[in-house]
Image (cartoon, rainbow, N blue to C red):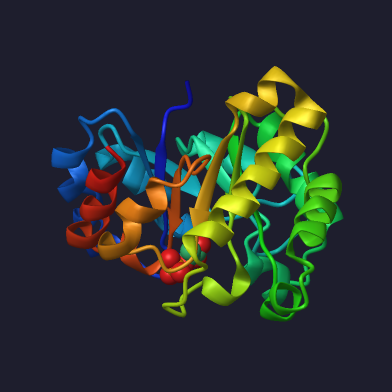
Amino acid sequence: MRIKLAAGNWKMNGVQASLAEISALSDHTQGPSEVAICPPATLVAAAVAIAGDVAIGGQDCHAKTSGAHTGDISAEMLKDAGAAYVITGHSERREDHSESDADVNAKTQAGWAAGLSVILCIGESLEERESGATLDRMAAQMAASVPDGATGANLVIAYEPIWAIGTGKVPSLDEIAEVHAFIRKTLTDRFGDEGAKMRVLYGGSVKPSNAAEIFAVADVDGALVGGASLKAADFSGIIEALN
Ligand code: PEP
């Protein structure tokens, strides 16, 4: 039985005053689903201090534990600040920082070494979707970016079609079902029972108004949410749809 997860990715948004949005989620964390927020690194420790039942995560980590990497943060630092999760492989990191599947693999291993659970993002471009290459792309990304040693406890996969992120566009429910079934089969073929325990989230323009129908799709174990996680009023609607 997989515990469903509503994870918010605040991206490069949020200042101290934004922590009130996390506090305001406290009325929505009694349900069976897990709730997580990944604020910017500057807010991780302060978020942990007021988070209550909301798990806090980082949005990225360096593959190394320490050293001469100006501006970067390590998974150990996130763990030390009280984080439980770290996102790796978000398409904005892959695009803005030219992160390869090999980089994502190394960062994921660093997250595990620090004791974090990793939310590892994969997803196709619009061109790949339109040329019918989506499933091949998912297979290739998972083969190269998911390290050996993945378990139901240390890995969450987030399927995020790049063209659906922040655009208001969402794949059809059949398309989501097809990709999630493919991801699940790929995980169980490789990791057996542990693959069956891994949560597979959908991400890309999830809102309170479309969350329930997406969560009703087989093998969708929750969502990774960007814009609609910034305000408790929106994110709580998504959490309620999951519960
Ligand atoms: C994301 O950034 O992971 C995401 C899914 O963003 P949005 O919900 O805004 O599309």
Instruction: Check the image and report above or below for 184 versus 166.
Output: above
Pick whichever, 207 or 74, lies toward us. Answer: 207
Q: Please, which residue is most extreme toward the front here?
A: 174
Instruction: Check the image and report above or below for 17 versus 37.
Output: below
Viewer can see residue 149? no
Q: Quadrant of residue 175?
A: bottom right
Instruction: Check the image and report above or below for 221 versus 203.
Output: above
Pick whichever, 193 or 6, lies toward us. Answer: 193
- Residue depicted at x 71% and y 30%: 113
Q: Position of residue 63 (x, y in %)?
A: 77, 48
Q: Position of residue 223 (x, y in %)?
A: 44, 50
Q: How many marks?
A: 0
Instruction: Check the image and report above or below for 187 versus 96.
Output: above
Pick whichever, 178 or 52, lies toward us. Answer: 178
In the image, is 5 to the left or to the right of 24? right
- Residue depicted at x 83% and y 31%: 148
- Residue depicted at x 74% and y 64%: 134
